[in-house]
């Protein structure tokens, strides 16, 4: 089916990080029953699908991104019955469940890896990526994303295995057709259970060629993806999204080809990686280049028009909170959170809302002992060893730690924010007494209500799905403005990205248009107040 007819063109997806969403049994960890309890909240927000970060059986070295059984639910989250109940309860509210497929690697506790480690002749040995070696001299100097060498020595086999992430996340060998077949059968099994879609974790890294130092965008990548798609997703009406850190628009057109040969859409990060020094790690901070942000959005909006499909997002479970990053989490928290939402939700693509973003949840500053994320903890140790100052490391952690996004959902102002009756697995952000869902759901001026309006507008106005994007005032240092146009209507979005009042250069255009949503109660066409944002429409 061509992209134009796809239902997900008007969809909005909500991402849940299950361990931090809602605990139902007092063990301090969110779970599937907890999600079921909160479905009415999501129905009220109006979203069409939930992307569930991994809930399969896992030793939780990387919070579930290390799966030891793809066909079972981790007992921490519930069981298969709970999962089926979640799918059914969500369906009653017209919400689909999108599962997270982690196919680049498994856990080292997966049955396949336990077998693979037994001998070089074991039928599962070749499910992973091995190189002969001599202890102490890895095949090359490749580094793992979570620190240390990408090669781990197994004395029994006198071999190294390859891992792009932690040592407990051995890379799967996609060159092996037997492995690929097992993966497809597993996916078909989930499709049979009524799963509505899949998010493909670091899918751009599956076709690695470690001998050539290639991790992302390997030579056989799109061949593998097309086979995967044909053998599985194309047999159902699914929504699929490929996580691809290394995608440029050309490659994104392959991932999201309207002929349906790969995925529905791509999830790429070019607009996200701007506050780091070029060629360095994400911890090496750099100031936000506003004009660059505009240029990147402009490029992606124009280049994929009619020939690809993008995800629209500011936040996820790996990223700091957007209002603390590109917005203002102090005086103008409410205004800037809404501005960022209006800006993003006016564009072409499928919007994603990460849990708590719709409340304007912010980053945290914990003592180091209170951080839980493996990436954060490993980086802290490595940088201390390299001689970095503690304050400098903590500065990076405050700005970029993944735990910024992983503090529990702030439901109300009672103890532990209504997240759990036990001891939460990670500390809450202390600002939950002020920032929480209970205080926002019935307030028409809340951030929640602004998101709810934006989700509704996407259903109501086809121009939001189809309209052609045009950037306005490209060189303006304060304003982000653009139009979207189709045969019948024209949409205008204008945002003041900063905390000062400025003259509004578009007062004439605005006069002729109808205001759909804004973030200040009254309107003054001549000026834009701090972080002011407005979305207008006019019929042609
Ligand atoms: C993706 C996930 C991240 C995980 C990594 C390894 O980037 O979003 O949370 O740590 O892949 O699976
Ligand atoms: Ca629980």
Image: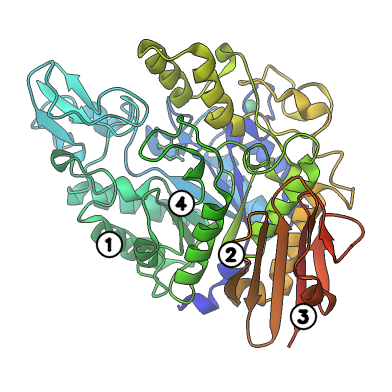
Q: Please determine whether, in this image, residue 165 is positioned above or below residue 357.
A: above
Q: Which one is in front in this view, the residue at disc 2 or the one at disc 1?
A: 2
Q: How far is the residue under mark 4 from the one under mark 3?
A: 31 Å
Q: Which one is in front in this view, the residue at disc 2 or the one at disc 4?
A: 2
**Label number found at residue 227:** 1
Q: Which residue is mark 2?
A: 474
- Residue 501 lies, in percent from the top left, at 80, 51
Q: How far is the residue under mark 3 from the one under mark 2?
A: 22 Å
Res. 386 in view: yes
Query: In the figure, residue 481 lies in which quadrant?
Result: bottom right
Q: Which residue is mark 4?
A: 270
**Label number found at residue 499:** none
Q: Which one is in front in this view, the residue at disc 4 or the one at disc 1?
A: 4
Q: Which one is in front in this view, the residue at disc 3 or the one at disc 1?
A: 3
In the shown orientation, is residue 42 left or right of residue 276? right
How packed mark 2 is, by other alpha carbons closer than 10 Å (few <14, some 14-19, many 20 or more), is some
Q: Nearer the viewer, residue 12 or 236?
A: 12
Q: Which residue is mark 3?
A: 538
Query: Which circle's residue, 2 or 1, is located before the other in the chain?
Result: 1
Query: Which circle's residue, 3 or 2, is located before the other in the chain?
Result: 2
**Marks 4 and 3 close (CB-CB < 8 Å):** no
Q: Which one is in front in this view, the residue at disc 3 or the one at disc 2?
A: 2
Residue at x 57%, y 30% (from the top left corner): 399
- Residue 470 lies, in percent from the top left, at 59, 73
Beta carbon of the mark 4 residue lies under 8 A of ligand 1: no
């Amino acid at each position: 089916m061509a992209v134009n007819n796809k239902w997900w063109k008007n969809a909005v997806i909500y991402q849940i990080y299950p361990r931090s969403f809602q605990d139902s049994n007092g063990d301090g960890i969110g779970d599937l029953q907890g999600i079921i309890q909160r479905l009415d909240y999501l129905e009220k927000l109006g979203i069409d699908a939930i992307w569930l970060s991994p809930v399969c059986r896992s030793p939780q070295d990387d919070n579930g991104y290390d799966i030891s059984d793809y066909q079972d639910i981790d007992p921490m989250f519930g069981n298969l019955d709970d999962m089926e109940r979640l799918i059914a309860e969500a369906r009653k509210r017209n919400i689909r469940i999108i599962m997270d497929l982690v196919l680049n690697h498994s856990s080292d506790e997966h049955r396949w890896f336990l077998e693979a480690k037994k001998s070089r002749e074991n039928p599962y040995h070749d499910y992973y990526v091995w190189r002969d070696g001599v202890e102490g001299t890895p095949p090359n100097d490749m580094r793992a994303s979570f620190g240390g060498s990408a090669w781990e020595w197994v004395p029994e086999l006198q071999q190294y295995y390859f891992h792009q992430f932690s040592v407990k996340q051995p890379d799967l060998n996609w060159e092996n057709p037997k492995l690929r077949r097992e993966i497809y059968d597993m996916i078909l099994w989930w499709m049979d259970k009524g799963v509505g879609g899949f998010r493909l974790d670091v899918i751009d890294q599956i076709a690695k060629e470690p001998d050539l130092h290639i991790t992302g965008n390997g030579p056989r990548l799109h061949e593998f993806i097309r086979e995967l798609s044909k053998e599985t997703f194309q047999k159902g009406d699914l929504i699929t999204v490929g996580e691809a850190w290394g995608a440029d628009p050309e490659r994104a057109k392959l991932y999201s080809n309207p002929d349906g040969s790969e995925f529905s859409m791509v999830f790429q990060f070019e607009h996200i990686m701007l506050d780091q020094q070029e060629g360095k790690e994400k911890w090496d901070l750099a100031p936000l280049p506003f004009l660059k942000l505009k240029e990147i959005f402009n490029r992606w909006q124009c280049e994929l028009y009619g020939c690809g499909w993008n995800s629209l997002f500011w936040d996820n479970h790996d990223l700091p909170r957007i209002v603390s990053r590109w917005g203002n989490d102090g005086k103008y928290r409410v205004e800037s959170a809404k501005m960022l939402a209006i800006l993003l939700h006016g564009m072409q693509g499928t919007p994603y809302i990460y849990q708590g973003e719709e409340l304007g949840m912010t980053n945290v500053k914990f003592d180091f002992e209170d951080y839980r994320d493996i990436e954060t903890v490993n980086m802290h140790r490595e940088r201390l060893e390299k001689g970095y100052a503690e304050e400098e490391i903590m500065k990076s952690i405050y700005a970029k730690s993944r735990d910024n996004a992983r503090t529990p959902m702030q439901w109300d102002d009672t103890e532990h924010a209504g997240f759990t009756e036990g001891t939460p697995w990670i500390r809450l952000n202390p600002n939950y007494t002020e920032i929480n869902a209970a205080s926002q759901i019935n307030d028409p001026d809340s951030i929640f209500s602004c998101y709810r309006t934006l989700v509704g507008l996407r259903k109501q106005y086809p121009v939001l799905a189809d309209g052609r994007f045009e950037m306005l005032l490209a060189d303006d240092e304060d304003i982000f403005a653009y139009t979207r146009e189709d045969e019948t209507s024209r949409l205008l979005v204008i945002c003041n990205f900063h905390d000062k009042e400025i003259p509004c250069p578009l007062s004439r255009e605005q006069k002729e248009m109808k205001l759909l949503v804004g973030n200040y109660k009254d309107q003054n066409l001549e000026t834009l107040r701090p972080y002011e944002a407005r979305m207008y429409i006019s019929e042609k």
